[in-house]
Image: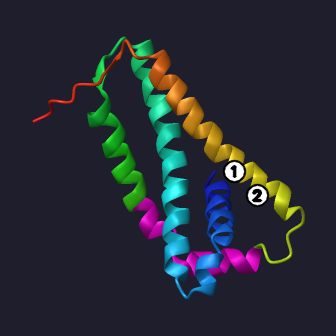
Amino acid sequence: MKKFFYYCFYRIASGFSFFSALNLFNISLAYADLWVSIGQTFNIFTLACIFCYCLHIKFEFVLVFFPILVTVVVLNSFLLTSDKYFELQKKYKDEKQKKLKGWGVFFYLVFSILIGLVCIWGFKDNISFNTKLI
């Protein structure tokens, strides 16, 4: 799985290459890090929803989703750096079917978010959306 997430990071950062033309390369890396983190967060949250549903555990959305998001973003900010991008760029320099693999990364992100939202809707009886958190 690590190789897959590294590849997603590389393809997304390469997709934001117009920032490189503006000498804003770190912004493209930050966007790539954010999108990979969002996909991972929705995957972990979906698994947490299924687990809590099977055990009949009710939980607060904000107290589960946002700690997962913050943890994943912080961990990815240490793992997905510019050095890693340049290493991946050398590795995938001569890859075949770039466009097809890029669409695969796009659909991974879209389906991760969609499945997470469907999971929130489907398990809404176990999820509390209390907005009055102290």
Secondary structure of the residue carrying tag 2 is helix
Magenta residues, as a range?
Answer: 75-91
Q: Answer left or right for 17 relative to 57.
A: right
Magenta span contains residue 17: no
Q: Residues within 10 Å of mark 1 (few under 14, many from 20)?
A: some
Does the image show residue 50? no
Secondary structure of the residue carrying tag 1 is helix
**Residue found at x 48% / y 38%:** 44
In the image shown, does 117 or 90 lie closer to the viewer? 117
Q: Is residue 25 above or below residue 11?
A: below
Q: Is residue 75 above or below residue 44?
A: below
Residue placed under numbered mark 1 in the picture: 106
Check residue 102 in the rendering and tell me which mark sits there, or answer none: 2
**Residue found at x 55% / y 38%:** 113
- The amino acid type, in three-letter code, at marker 1 is Phe
In the image shown, does 17 or 57 lie closer to the viewer? 17
- Residue 121, how many percent across, how many down? 47, 20
> Is there a contact, CB below 8 Å, between mark 2 and mark 1?
yes
- The amino acid type, in three-letter code, at marker 2 is Gly
Check residue 75 in the rendering and tell me which mark sits there, or answer none: none
